[in-house]
Amino acid sequence: MGVHDIFNMLIKWTVPVILFMTACLALFLICYKLFYQKLLLGKRKISWPRFILVILLLGYLFLVFVITTLSRGGNYSGQINLNLISGYLDVWNSWSSTSFLLLVYNIAMLMPLGFMLPLISLKFRTWKAALFSALIYTTFIEVFQLISHRGIFELDDLVHNIIGAIAGYLIIKIFLDYKNEKKFRKSTMIKAAIIPMFYVCLFGGAILAYNLQEFGNMSIRPSQGTDISGVSISCEVDLTKNRSEVPIYYNVNANQPKRAFNIISVLQRTINLPQIHRIGNNGENKQYEFLRDDNVTSSLIYFKGDGTWWLSDDNTADIDSKATDADTRNKIEKMLKENSFIPANAILECDQNGTFRWDASAVDPTRMKKDFLNGMVMVDVTASGKISMLHYGLTENKYVRQVQTISPMEAFKKVMNGEFDSYRPYVSGDKIKITEMQMRYMYDSKGYYQPVYEFTGSLNSEEGACSIMIPALP
């Protein structure tokens, strides 16, 4: 969940939150005027500043609730995650801004609770009040997610929410102490700095360790593993205990967001691509939008993980009308070669869908031990001669060195121990039958092409329903 996703959800739920706050305000005033003043003859007046803070806090807590529950589909299966460091392992394994921001969001989510409670009442001017208030509220959310299947109960989310509420309380206490004593108390400021400094040191240490290691991290490494208790796992593959040495490669174009601007510059010069209209994020990837004179929007997505990119437009009028003649093919082939999008000896072919494409020769990475290209380039040209789609799916892999892997038997033991992540939870009585094992390659977070073992087979007699990935490096 990125900043763009949060912003869209805030817009989506703005009106319901305002209606909720209005309903709370109306209900309170009715109770105050009708019951408290008229029936009970109460004389105590409302403290409007505190009352407004209460309404704002209720509105914020309602917003947190709908974002964390109602904004999700009910497609979870009642899982419980009691691993306190799974969130940190997610950040480490994926090394992505999305995982990092999700962790930060979980901490910051209830900071306003810690801010506002001490301002509402003197009874809440202790860190224990912030702790217990956050504990009650976030437990309610986690339990609701569990029973409604709109999320899973995660202990680390609960702890991070509480940490955020305490951090908010410690920060506001600096200003409350200043208001009372007309000076900043050193002890209060030190306490308020403990939580931020802890995370600065934690993430700083992680960045240092990440930069010191040779290869990147693998997102398929499990953060919490998979519960396979009661699951029967059999293997029909002959697995060896011998370790092997295989090549590892480096993708020179991976993790190079600035390269997108070079690509855009080339396309603006060669196919009259307009100036950038908007820049955004598409998950971990960068997305650039261009508005043409005919009001057609084109977009280019740069895929950070492997350095590939995709240019397309939203004009569907000519989708069934493509130019496939030899002159168009020669023109496109020349443009691609002049800009080094395909090798000089490449020959474009037109497939049955009217798309010009060139595919790199299929290779076995486990045996190459030299630089190679992998993937394809595809181009669609409209009848009017405009490029409506250009997909650069080539990866340039440079040979690095030989690395020793774990054995297939060691990898299978990890499967037997549930040392893998699965999007589909298993239940007691499930039967997994492994019928094939092969070594594949995947890009890590630094752009290295790493070997992984893929175990495939059937789940409860459903062929092809099981695929388990285990990193091949120790």
Image (tube, grey):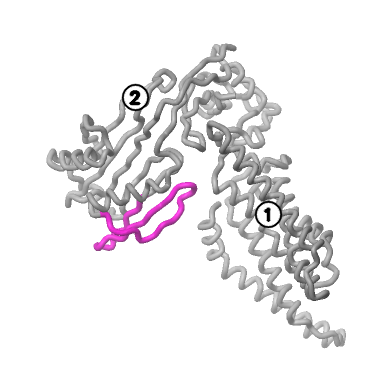
At 62% across and 24% down in the image, what residue appears?
415
At 44% across and 28% down in the image, what residue appears?
249
Magenta: main secondary structure equals strand
Residue 456 x %, y %: 52, 24
Q: How many marks?
A: 2
* In the foreground, 270 or 293: 270
- Please tell me whether mark 1 sits on a helix, a strand or a loop: helix
Residue 417 left/right relative to 121 = left
At 40% across and 39% down in the image, what residue appears?
253
Q: Which residue is mark 1?
A: 107
Q: Is residue 403 above or below residue 346?
A: above
In the image, which residues are magenta? 273-300
Q: Which residue is mark 2?
A: 362
Work out whether residue 116 can be spotted.
Answer: yes
At 63% across and 28% down in the image, what residue appears?
430
Q: Quadrant of residue 17?
A: bottom right
